[in-house]
Amino acid sequence: MEAVNSSSSISELDDISRLLDRPRLNIERKRSFDERSFSEMGIFETLNSPGGRSGWDTPVSSARNSFEPHPMVAEAWDALRRSLVYFRGQPVGTIAAYDHASEEVLNYDQVFVRDFVPSALAFLMNGEPDIVKNFLLKTIQIQGREKKIDRFKLGEGAMPASFKILHDPIKKTDTVIADFGESAIGRVAPVDSGFWWIILLRAYTKSTGDTSLAETPECQKGMRLILSLCLSEGFDTFPTLLCADGCSMVDRRMGVYGYPIEIQALFFMALRSAMSMLKHDTEGKEFMERIVKRLHALSFHMRSYFWLDFQQLNDIYRYKTEEYSHTAVNKFNVIPDSIPEWVFDFMPLRGGYFIGNVSPARMDFRWFALGNCVAILASLATPEQSAAIMDLIEERWEELVGEMPVKICHPAIESHEWRIVTGCDPKNTRWSYHNGGSWPVLLWLLTAACIKTGRPQIARRAIDLAEARLLKDGWPEYYDGKSGRFIGKQARKYQTWSIAGYLVAKMMLEDPSHLGMISLEEDKQTKPVIKRSYSWTC
């Protein structure tokens, strides 16, 4: 149990107060922030200023330093506040979009768990934690409901994809209608919702210093139920989570079934976040033991088998097949001829990334932005791997960022492959939506990853691109085209997480100490010695 107790102090390792005690910021080993770049914007003065709330010109905050906010900032705050949803007079979330020009509302008038995360971070950074607390409590109440799709009952720990508040002006009542996947396209339950909930609970705790919410019986039970779902024993031979297509941000058929990087990175981050919040009672310690074992196996597996750089690509290219026994090098029996041609030109000598998926005889070499950025923030990526991911982004800027940050994945699938993989999905045509579209919401994740790796200039460059068009274009949901030049053909305007993603990115650049609520330092206990010739055992 000594190992468990030391692991459970992860929250102390990433305590952001350490940032305030140093004249020079060092969040990652072997790298430091671009001190000159930050000093140009007055960020070091911000770090030492009292309060902690960001200096945006909003109704609840005033400028505390010489940082000059972009004119878009006030517009963004106004738009974000117009998206608020109320339950019995209290704000409990933000709707996905309020595009009044669109004739079809569909489910964009609902509060999505994953969509609310950047909104929640914006409010936390602006010193408005109450709405986040209300959201966390409301969703944990919804989790306790019986969940059925047709005649099948979902796991008790499943969290909703979204919920809607129905107001009855006559009876003066509010009713919560939740969707656990029964109304979603494809009828897939959201695997990522529970992970985002745990991550957001930690962000609330780190931002406010209030541990009482996480310690409530409701939140403790909610965490245990989520963990029970993903830590349950089965027929798996890998520590990664097996998932269906459409269970995360990529919520349509896109060939990400199996072990998608987005889910694995969020899973890792949620496990580490839960470790810092579970009580040290009998039930809590039992889960901590299971989490520690899973983190060891998961970090080794991901860093060994999902990681791709020039050397590893060359090794795979030279793989032998049909190997047997624990001495096999090609453990997943990947056929070298299955390596797509594009990856040989895409992979630079300097750089690397976690590929999209790894399973028997299959490697999905596509780049997925969310999974790689979360891997950096959760310290699933080693410091060296984190630096390599940022190197790749710089080397392949036109492909991964283009004219509007950030590409959700690269490259797009097209022609016959598109027909087979997506089922001829008219929304996911090449370089559109989830199939290589550009999503402004990912700007906050890119910015956080840049700050953690000491590359703020990359984030500033991406933000400059977004500021040139986002407001003028009406805050679209996504952009289309190989370089992200065109507003998405079915993109909703005034998409809330596009607005919030921009605000969070701006506030983190202004005050990098905000990074602490969404970033975890590397845990020495989960740092394995990676030797690919070894066999993995659970």
Image (cartoon, rainbow, N blue to C red):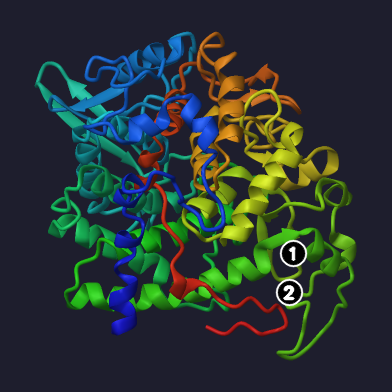
- Residue 67 at x, y percent in the picture: 40, 19
State the residue at coordinates (19%, 38%): 134
State the residue at coordinates (40%, 11%): 75
**Residue 306 as seen in the image, left or right of residue 273:** right
**Depth order, front residue of 432/406:** 406
Tell me: residue 302, above or below residue 424.
Answer: below
The amino acid sitting under disc 1 is Arg
- Residue 432 at x, y percent in the picture: 68, 29
- Residue 41 at x, y percent in the picture: 46, 24
The amino acid sitting under disc 2 is Phe
Circle 2 sits in a helix, a strand or a loop, which is it? loop
C-beta proximity under 8 Å, tags 2 and 1: yes
Circle 1 sits in a helix, a strand or a loop, which is it? strand
Tell me: residue 345, above or below residue 151.
Answer: above
Picture quadrant of residue 57:
top left
**Residue 299 as seen in the image, left or right of residue 230:** right
Residue at numbered disc 2: 332
**Residue 488 as seen in the image, left or right of residue 471:** right
Disc with the residue nearer the chain's start (2 vs 1):
2
- Residue 155 at x, y percent in the picture: 35, 61
Residue at numbered disc 1: 362
